[in-house]
Image: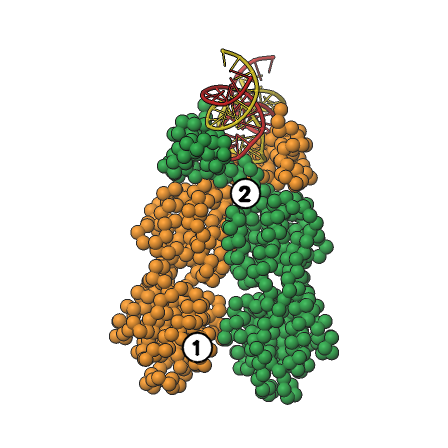
Chain colours: A green, B orange, C red, D yellow
Amino acid sequence: MPGEAGTRGVRAGRPPQVDSRDVAADVGVSQATVSRALRNDPSVAEKTRLRVQEAARRLGYVPNDLGRSFKNQATHRIAFVADLDNPLWSLLVAQAHDELADHGYTMTLLAEHGDPVKILTYLAGGWADAVIISSARLDAQLPQMLSRRGVPFVLVNRTLAGTAADAVVADNIRGGRAAAQLLIEAGHTRVGALFGPPETSTGRDRELGFREGLAQGGVSLPKSRVLHGEFDYAFGRTALSTLLRGRYRPTAVFCTNDIIAVGAINAAHELGLRIPDDLALTGFDDLEEASWPVYNLTTMKVPFDAMLSSAIRMLLNRLAGDDSPAHVDVHAVTPVLRGTHAMVRGVAAEMPPAAAPRAGRA
Amino acid sequence: MPGEAGTRGVRAGRPPQVDSRDVAADVGVSQATVSRALRNDPSVAEKTRLRVQEAARRLGYVPNDLGRSFKNQATHRIAFVADLDNPLWSLLVAQAHDELADHGYTMTLLAEHGDPVKILTYLAGGWADAVIISSARLDAQLPQMLSRRGVPFVLVNRTLAGTAADAVVADNIRGGRAAAQLLIEAGHTRVGALFGPPETSTGRDRELGFREGLAQGGVSLPKSRVLHGEFDYAFGRTALSTLLRGRYRPTAVFCTNDIIAVGAINAAHELGLRIPDDLALTGFDDLEEASWPVYNLTTMKVPFDAMLSSAIRMLLNRLAGDDSPAHVDVHAVTPVLRGTHAMVRGVAAEMPPAAAPRAGRA
DNA sequence: CGTGGTCTTGTATACGTATACATCACCAGA
DNA sequence: TCTGGTGATGTATACGTATACAAGACCACG
C-alpha cells in the first residue's frame, strides 16, 4: 500500500513536511478536526482547538498552500502585468504589493514584454485569482482573452480600444490641455513636443489634449518641432538635441511624461542651456524626482496612489462577486508649477538663445 | 454520484473550465493519455498526440496550474524578498524576472517590511520553490528559518552574520578602500562620510573599507564629519546640509551608495555649491542615473547583472539537487571616474568655500 | 499457430486540504 | 425511560493532474 507514514510529504532532499494528518495523529483526532480547528471553525470545542493549535505549533505544522489552493481553486494571488522597461512600474508595484498584502493577497509579477501566449496560459490556468494590467498597448490582446476566460482584471493608467473593461485612468486629455495653456500663458509661441508612443492611451490622449490646448490658444505646432518615442530617458535625452537642431527652435517643450522630461533636462544640461531661461519644459506624472532641486520640474500631477487604490478596490469587488457593468474611473490631473517653465518677457530667442528674464510662478 | 459533467470546474460566476477529462472524452481516450500527450510523452502514438492536441486547442483547454503544482508539490515559482523602500530593488527585480522566465520560473514579490511570520508561513507552505533575498538586515531571521525548513534560498547583495548560506556579494570592503584612495589621491584631507545602516552588510563593509583606506592614507575621519542613515534620497539630501553646517566642513564626502549621493548632489545644488569645485562626492553602485549629465557621479561600479545571474544560477543548481556546501560568490568592484571628484590644487577651502580649480580625471 | 516482445492505452491512485454528511455522546423535557 | 435536539467529531469524498502498473493489440519469429 502506497502512502505509508514516513514516505508522505518528502520532497527530494528536504526535511519531511508535517501535514495535517500528522497533527491529527499527535492529538488523537481526525484530520478534519485539525483543519477545522486551525481555521477557527466554531463547531470545534474550545478545548480541542487549543490542543490542536498547541500540537501544530510544537510540530512546526504549516498548512500546505498548494493543497489549500488546489482544494479551493483559488490562490489568493494577484498577477501584476507591467511594462518593466518603463520605470513607472516600480512605483505602482510597490504600492500594489502593500495594499494587496493588507487584503491577504500576494502578488506575482509578469512583464508585458514576455511571451503573450505563455502569460495567457499562466493566467487561464488558475495561476492567479485576478490581474492588474498597468501598461497595455492599445492593441493588446490580453484583456480580451482574460475576459473570455472569465478572469477578473483591471487596467491601471491606460485603457484599451474597444474592450469594455474596468479601468482607472487619469484625465490625460485635460492634463494635456492644461499643459498647453500653461505654456501659452507664459507667453510661448514657438512650442515643441516630445510625445510618447501613439499606441498607448496615455501617449495618445496627452498628445490629443496638448494639441487641442495649443489650437485653442492659437499656437501652431509644426511637424518639425514634434517627435514621437518611448516613455523613457533615452528618448528624452536624444530627442531634445534633435529638436534643438531645427531652424526655428522651440522656446518651450512639452514632454509627455516626467521620464522624458528628465532625459530632456539632462540633454539641456549637457548642451549648457539654462532652464527655464533658454528653454522651458513641462513634464507629466509628477514623479518624486520631479520635485528634486536638480530638476525642479513643472509637471502635471497624476494621482497614482488614489488610482491604484481605486483599481484594487474594483478588483476585490469583482472577486467578491460584483458583476455590475465595466466601469472606467477617471481621475483629475493637477498642474504642479515649479521651475522649468517661465514667463517669456521679451521676444523669444532666435538662433543663438538669448536670456529671457526668469519669472517663476510657484 | 457527484462530479457529473456540467458541475465540474465551475468557479463562481465564471465560464466552466475545460479540464483534461473533457478533452479525453472529446477525443475518446483516457485522461491519462491526454496528460501524456500534452506533455509530449514519447510513449504516446504520434497520431493520438496530434488528435489530443487538436482537441485541446479546439476546446480551449489550459492545464490547471493548481492541480499540476499540487500533484508535483512544486510551483515553478520563486519568491523575491526585497526591501521596497530601497529603489535598488526595481533594478534587481526586473532582471530577475527575465532570467527566471528564461528558465520557466515565475516570480512573486514579497516586501521585507511585511510581517516576517506571514512571509515564513507562505514560504514554508510550499508557496514558492525557492527564495531570492535581496536585502537582508544582518539580524534577519528569515534565512535561518528557511534553511531549517529546507527551502533553498540565496542572498544577493548582502550577507548575514553567522549563517552559512549561499550568497552573492560585491567586494564592498575593497570598494570602500578604493573610494578612500581616490579622494586621497585627489588631495583631499578634510573628508566626510554619509554611511548607510550599520545593520546591513553593505553599509558595514563599505564603511569598514573606507575607514581602512583613509587610515592607510593617513587621513582622519572625525565623528563630526560622519553621519549614518538609510540608503535613500532623503538621508543624502538632509545629511549633506547637516554635514556642511560643521565648523570644519569637508571638501569631499563619501556617499555609501548612489542614492545617497544623488540626495547629496541635490542638496548641494540647492545650496548653490559647485561640484566638484566646492565639494567633491563619490557614490557606490553605479546606477544608471550616475552617468546622467546632471549628476555625472564618480562612483564604484557594482556588477549587479553578473551578481544576479550568478545568484540565479546557484539557486537553480540547488533546485536541481546540488547539495554542496554553501558558497559565497564575491564580485569585484571597479571605480568609475566621472565629474564629482576632482584634484585639489590649492589649499582646501575654509568657511566660505573658495573655488578650487577643476581637474576632472575622466 | 503459439510465444515473447514492443507499443500503446487504460486503470487506479496519490498529492493535502476543506467540507457535506453521518454518527455519536450527552442532556433536557415529557 | 424514551425522544428529540444540540454540540462535537469522524468518515468519506472531491478538487485536476501525473504516473506506476496492468493490460491489450499487434507483430515477428520459431
Residue B219 appears at what percent x and percent y?
Answer: 27, 75
Q: Residue at x 39, y 33 (%)?
A: A51
**Residue at image mark 1:** B268
Q: Residues within 10 Å of mark 2 (few under 14, many from 20)?
A: many
Toward the viewer: A336 or A37? A37
Q: Residue at x 59, y 63 (%)?
A: A303
Question: Does any portion of residue A62 appear in the rendered image?
Answer: yes
Dot 2 falls on which chain? A
Residue B152 appears at what percent x and percent y?
Answer: 41, 45
Q: Residue at x 43, y 77 (%)?
A: B268
The answer to whether the residue labelled 2 contacts the one labelled 1, judged by CB atoms less than 8 Å apart, is no
Tell me if residue A124 comes above or below residue B353 in the rendering: above
Does dot 2 land on a helix, a strand or a loop? loop
Tell me if residue A25 comes above or below residue B101 in the rendering: above
Toward the viewer: A157 or A99? A99
Image label count:
2
Residue A245 appears at what percent x and percent y?
Answer: 62, 80
Taking B64 as reference, is B185 left or right? left
Question: Does any portion of residue A207 appear in the rendered image?
Answer: no
Does dot 1 land on a helix, a strand or a loop? helix
Assign the N terminus of chain B to one quadrant of the image.
top right
Taking A70 as reference, is B177 left or right? left
The amino acid type, in three-letter code, at marker 2 is Thr
Dot 1 falls on which chain? B
Quarter holding residue B347: bottom left
Please give the label number shown on residue A245.
Answer: none
Tell me if residue A230 comes above or below residue A109 in the rendering: below
The amino acid type, in three-letter code, at marker 1 is Ala
Q: Residue at x 34, y 54 (%)?
A: B139
**Residue at image mark 2:** A75
